Structure formats: C-alpha cells, structure tokens
Image (spheres, helix red, strand yellow):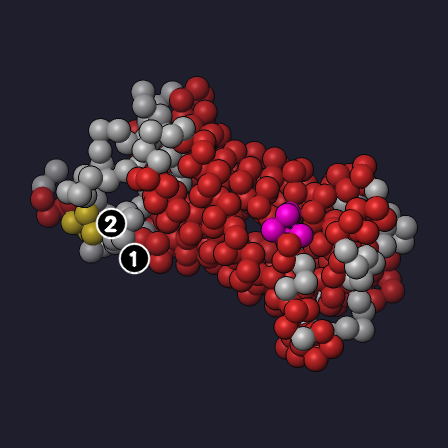
Amino acid sequence: MGEKSRFKMGGIDGRICEEFSLKYYGICTIGGMLSAGTTHLAITPLDVLKVNMQVNPTKYGSISSGLNTLWREQGHSSLWRGSTSKFFGYGLQGGCRFGLYEYFKKLYSDILVDQHKGLIFLLSGASAQVFADVALCPFEAVKVRVQAQRHFGKGLLDGFPKLYATEGVSGFYKGLAPLWGRNLPFSIFMFSTFEHSVDFLYRDIIKRRKEECSKGQQLVVTCAAGYAAGAVGTFVSNPADNIVSSLYNKNANTISQAVKQIGLLNLFTRSLPIRFMLVGPVITMQWFLYDSIKVLAGLPTSGGLKTQQSSGRISENSLIAYEG
C-alpha cells in the first residue's frame, strides 16, 4: 500500500483523528448524544406507558390494555408526552455516558496496569454514569411528571419553569439518588456485559481478531453484544426504576416508603416486560449507531482495552478483543 493511500480523511488509515485525542473523545461524545437522544425519542409512547404502569399498576395492568386506556382517555398526543425531555435529557446523558466511559477506560487502563480488565470496565462505567445522571436528572424530573400527571404541563418548555416555581432547584434533583441507584448498576453491568460479550464473540464464535473482520461483521458483533448488555442491565436496574417513578409522582416521600408500598417482589417484576421491550432494542440500537459513527470517522468499533506508550504506538501489553 502506497504512502499516499494511507492518508485519507485527514488521518492515518482513514481516521479523522487519533484514538485518545481530544477530538476522539469529542466524536465519542457526539456519537453518544445522537445515538441515545434519537433512540429514546423513538420509544416515547412505550416510556409513557411504562411510567403510568409503575405509578398506577391497577389501571394500566398490561401493555395492550394500558396503551388502549391512554389512547381512549387522553388521545394519541398523550403517548408523546415528555418527548423533548427524553431527546435532550437522554442525549446529554448518552454523550456523557459514552464519551466519559471511553475517557475513564483509557485512564484506568493506564493506572491499573496489572489489574483485571473487568475491574477497569466496572470503574469506567460507574464513573461515567455519575456525571451522566447529573446531566439527565432535571430533564427526567420534568419528563416523569409530564407523563404521569396529566395537567402538570405539555413538555419541557412549560414543565421546567413550573417545576422550579413549585419545588425550586431541589425539585430537579429530588430523584438523583434513586436515579444513581437505577443507572449505576445498569451502566456497570451494561458496559461490562458488552465488553465481555465482544470478547466472547470474537474469541469463541468468530475465532478471529476484530481487525481481521470487515466493518459490517464488527457492527453485527456490536449489535449482539449490545442486546446482551441491555437485557442484563434492565433486570438489575428495575427496582430502582420503580422507586424513581414513585418518588417523582409523590406516591412516596422516601426511598424506604416507596420500597414498602411497592413490595420487594414487585420492585423486580413490575413493568419488567415492557422495560425488556424498551431497553434491550434501545441499547442495541444505541451501540449500533454509536459504533457506526465511529466507523464513519475511521475509528475502530467498541470493545477491548488499549494502552499507549509515549510514542503513540500500541504497547505489547495491549488488551484487545481477541488475541488469537
């Protein structure tokens, strides 16, 4: 291959930037924003139903009857309540989650050189999610109220000032602790499951290194690992998701009160089927869109750990998806 053909799109080997550079993290952040914002916007009707099933399980007892009840009593527009909050809120969350995960994974892989890579995935997912939920929390507070309280507001524009006028700044972050309780386990298990699934698929199923596979094959691996990650994350985060909805809609004033009212078994089972319908495909599509954006930028798909020497070359101790 000639030297000229190696320099395309302003970078080496078709890359518009080098990995671990500021521009690289910027692309990851933008990719996370677009992938998370658009996918969450698309499933708004099911999210509206999920919140109402959590707040009023007697009235909204199943997916089909719940959708029919919402449509009949409140009209088709009710299924899109909170859509602007979802797009902007989860867009910001996705940008922080994916962008900071890439940053912390590189940071911890350099610091914890001799540690098991599972610990690095765990710490990176948790660290990124802490900041991601701070960005999401005000939008989530408005979204849940708009979706479950019919006369609270129409959306973000009127919901934000109304919430501030009635509850002050604290109203926006009332659910931050349970939001962390829901999303920290989800993020930890989601990223860890994704990374280990990618490793398993290349090592035991495809039996080739990632670099030896086409971009299309790599994206198929991304989708398979993404679905597994979403399913595992959904189950472990379901109890906290029910608590968040109960607190925001004043069914309970404290976490302990919410747990007592909902019941231990219901914490794990209430709204779980619809969350599986929501989260599994959504996380799969997020990973697909996220990695597609990285591929279009000439960057490798997600999965694996890499460390860099000062020369910028990948070190001999680099952890990749499949060592062969």
Residue at point 51% right, 45% down? 126
Circle nearer the N terminus (2, 1): 2
Q: Quadrant of residue 170?
A: bottom right
Q: Where is residue 185 in the image (x, y as percent from the top left)?
A: 59, 42
Residue at point 52% right, 33% down? 193
Q: Which of 75 and 112 is in front in this view?
A: 112
Amino acid carrying label 1: it is Lys
User: Is residue 50 in view from this perspective?
Assistant: no
Q: Residues within 10 Å of mark 1 (few under 14, many from 20)?
A: few
Q: Where is residue 268 in the image (x, y as percent from the top left)?
A: 75, 39
Q: Is residue 225 left or right of residue 67?
A: left
Q: In this view, does 297 lie to the left or right of 285?
A: left
What's the distance in space between the residues labelled 2 and 1, CA to CA?
Answer: 8 Å
Amino acid carrying label 2: it is Glu
Q: Are marks 2 and 1 in contact (CB under 8 Å)?
A: yes
Tag 2 secondary structure: loop
Q: Mark 1 points at which residue?
A: 23
Q: Name the residue under label 2.
A: 18
Q: Where is residue 137 in the image (x, y as percent from the top left)?
A: 61, 61
Q: Is residue 140 magenta?
A: no
Q: Tell me where the magenta segment starts and ends, as one range.
A: 178-182
Q: Where is residue 304 in the image (x, y as percent from the top left)?
A: 37, 34
